[in-house]
Amino acid sequence: MSEANAIFEAMLGRFDADEADGMEAVFQFDLDDADSYHLSIEDGKCEMGTGEHDDPTVTLSMDVKTLKEVMSGELDGMAAFMQGKIRADGDIMLATKLTQIFPL
């Protein structure tokens, strides 16, 4: 299993359905040094897919190291965005909820 895949598997395990209540969203992750992944949230469930989604709500571009640091709490997502380590397109406010939907 790739490092990126392991990070997304861990995120699925931490999915907080209460935080995602009523949410319908697709988070597209375009990783600079790995395959692309997307997480689809609908009806209180989260599913992982590989590759490009047809209609993502928000697209986040970064390298695997940045993803790992943000999802482990080592790096604040907003700080990473301000430093240019994360590029975002689409519903950027939704991206700020990632650590609430997938808490540590």
Image (spheres, rainbow, N blue to C red):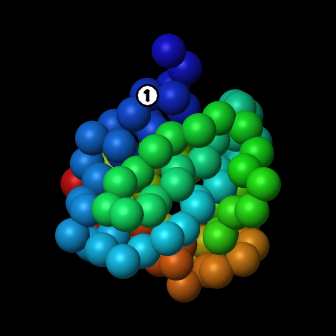
**Which residue is depicted at the point 71% across and 56% down?**
61
For residue 52, side relative to residue 48 (left or right):
right
Q: Which residue is disc 1 drawn over?
A: 6
**Rendered view: 27 above or below 24:** above
**Which residue is depicted at the point 78% across and 54% down?**
54
- Quarter holding the C terminus is bottom left
**In the image, residue 80 lies at what x, y percent?**
56, 67
**Which residue is depicted at the point 73% across and 38% down?**
51
**Which residue is depicted at the point 44% across and 62% down?**
42
For residue 101, side relative to residue 57 (left or right):
left
**In the image, residue 83 lies at what x, y percent?**
64, 71
Identify which amino acid the numbered label 1 is placed on: Ala
**In the image, residue 85 lies at what x, y percent?**
66, 61
Q: Secondary structure under badge 1?
A: helix
**Rendered view: 28 above or below 4:** below
**Rendered view: 95 above or below 103:** below
Query: Which of 100 and 18 lies nearest the eye of the viewer?
Result: 18
**Rendered view: 11 above or below 59:** above
Q: Is residue 102 visible?
A: no
Query: Which of 16 and 32 lies nearest the eye of the viewer?
Result: 16
Quadrant in the picture for residue 101: bottom left
**In the image, residue 86 lies at what x, y percent?**
65, 63
